[in-house]
Amino acid sequence: MSALVGFFHRNGAPAQPHGLDWMMRAVAHRGVDSSGTWCEGSVAFGHQMMWITPESQEEKLPLVNQRGDLVITADARIDNRQELCVRLNISPAEAKHLPDSAFILAAYEKWGIDCPKFLLGDFAFALWDSREQRLICVRDPMGVKILHYYQTPEIFAFSTEAKGILALPGVVKQLNENKLADWLIGNFNNQLNPEATFFQNIHYVRPAHTLVIEAERIVAYEYWQPNSWQPLPYKHDEEYLEAFRELFADALKCRLRSAYPIGVLLSGGLDSSAIACVAASQLREQGKELIPVAGILPENYQGIASDEREFVEAVCQQENLQPLYVSAAGKSPYKDLDRHFFYEESPIVWFYYLHDALQAALAQQQVRTVFHGIGAELGPSSHGKGYLPDLFKNLHWLTLGQEIAAVAQLQNRKWWRVFGGDVVLPLFSIQRKPYLLNQISPINPDFARELGLGNQLRRGTYLQDSFPVSMLEREIYAIKAVQGATSEIWYHHHLTWALPYYDIRLLAFCLAVPAHLKFKNGWNRNLIRLGMEGILPKKVQWRPDKVAFSPDYHSRLWKFGQEGILLLDEIERDSLAYHYLDIPKIRQMLYEYTQSPDPTYQKPILKPLTLQLFIHGGVIASQFLNWFEKLTPSVDL
């Protein structure tokens, strides 16, 4: 993933090149292939380039148009280039070597600030219009590409990483306590505060938004919403399924535009397996091969956990692929944390040790683009939650009875438990308690009281939200909740994500698909099951569940627990970690866990959420706060 940086002196002061140099140095680790700067008047732009597409290998950024009145810096993959050629009168010969940033620039010349409405793909860009004396900052609809900003009446600055902004003189590093509190209590709903970062006064550009920055004002425009879909013209189920297959294939094909080998994180589940099967076929037509990587248990493992190898092998044998198996044997979940914080600038995902090993395996194969099945539950792999309550409300009781019976049989549940849990509770318990109770949060009670969270946490009602009941409302809610929630964890080895399930055409299509195609005969995730008929191996297509991403996670927490205790013991009592976290309680629970029987051979004594969010999450948060205290431009430049 490339990086863009820059600033606009809103007070008209001339842009000083040394300020841009500091920003460029802060994100230099992203400029693995080239870099460039542009400075004129009160505006300065910079770019650190990582090549992905063939066109990017000839790209020079920042890019100035022929008249010299527009300049752009971008991290972008534009997927509807052919359509834009027609709309923008670009010849095929010209388009062949035209970089994606030039398409954005041409789109702006035609449509102005409405140009993002006509772009398809993953993008973050900044554009200076000297005619209008305004800066434009834009982020793609699902927020796959990242862009931060900082504003005062005197200056507006932007950067792919917060470190780029912190490098500017006068920008004060300050922790965003509310963002930290959300993380500590397990509130990961991104729509509640989509601009918040862990740095106070440094914000994300919101997904699907355009920021227009002028000397006297800043205006935000939302150019896309997940409910902006149209009814589909099909009458029969097979028509919907055929349309889904075509759209899914196109969502994959446009993300295959790469000058380097392409990989896929293959878990053996429905979502990643569907990607692997379709993408492998498409790449074979180009004379290329897909490189799957899969996380498995260490060799000679003996314990109660199981991995996904048999399902991965079913896909790879069918598609004649050679998988890379990775176990991350011997890797501790408590080590090498600062390196991950440097790239992510936030507390990290719990399974980073396995992610890192998977990345390294792909990087050895010169892969730069990695397909991932994240987001499938938003559309093709919808679990159909809300369908049974919808049947009840609409008096479709015969169908409801049939589905309840089918669910009971498939899931080995009593029919009345299905009715109570899947129909009655969603209908009458509208006020949900989706966030975690105090006893499994590592937050310091005193800090919780400072923010007024004490009573709410004890009741488990923090940020209690009116949760949608209907299936369509739930799906729209889920899309909004994850907009912008992508992680930078794949950047460590110069890799970038390809996320076909975040394709807004696919999301809009799935919102409009009839509910019975998503949930039928007791089967959830029905659209992708039926849509991949004849494409997925049967044992994958109709599997009812799957194992955890890192199946020996609990064993690692236990085996390397003493390392976590030592990290906690090294924390000084006047540190940020002690102020925000209940360090003694985290340490005590981790110690008690290490004294329990080895969870390799029996279920752990503590609940998974307690282990993940309180114990491991507490250690991670403590080390993140230590890293945050040490973070200064002089250190990281």
Image: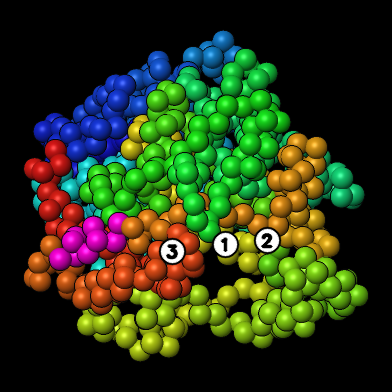
Question: Can residue 312 be spotted in the picture?
Answer: yes
Q: Which residue is mark 2?
A: 383
Q: What kind of element bears circle 2?
A: loop
Please state the extent of the stretch shown in magenta in the rendering: 560-569
Residue 63, image x, y percentages = 35, 24
Residue placed under numbered mark 1 in the picture: 478
Foreground: disc 1 or disc 2 = 2
Discs 2/3, front: 3
Rendered residue at 40%/48% (across/down): 487
Q: Give the residue type that dot 2 points to.
A: His
Residue 360 in percent (x, y) is at 38, 33
Q: Position of residue 402 (x, y in %)?
A: 87, 71
CB under 8 Å between callouts 2 and 3?
no
Name which residue lies at 47% across and 21% down: 260
Q: Quadrant of residue 195?
A: bottom left
Instruction: Name the quarter where the N terminus is drawn.
Output: top left
Q: Which mark is residue 599?
A: 3
Question: Magenta region, mostly helix, strand or loop?
Answer: helix
What label sits on residue 237 in the rendered view?
A: none
Residue 293: image location, x then y, percent = 51, 35
| Label 2 neighbour load within 10 Å: few <14, some 14-19, many 20+ | many
Relative to 389, residue 549 above or below: above
Label 1, secondary structure: give it: helix
Q: CA distance from mark 2 to mark 3?
A: 31 Å
Looking at marks 1 and 3 on the same chain, the residue that comes earlier in the sequence is marked by 1
Real-space Cα separation, disc 1 to disc 3, in angstroms: 34 Å
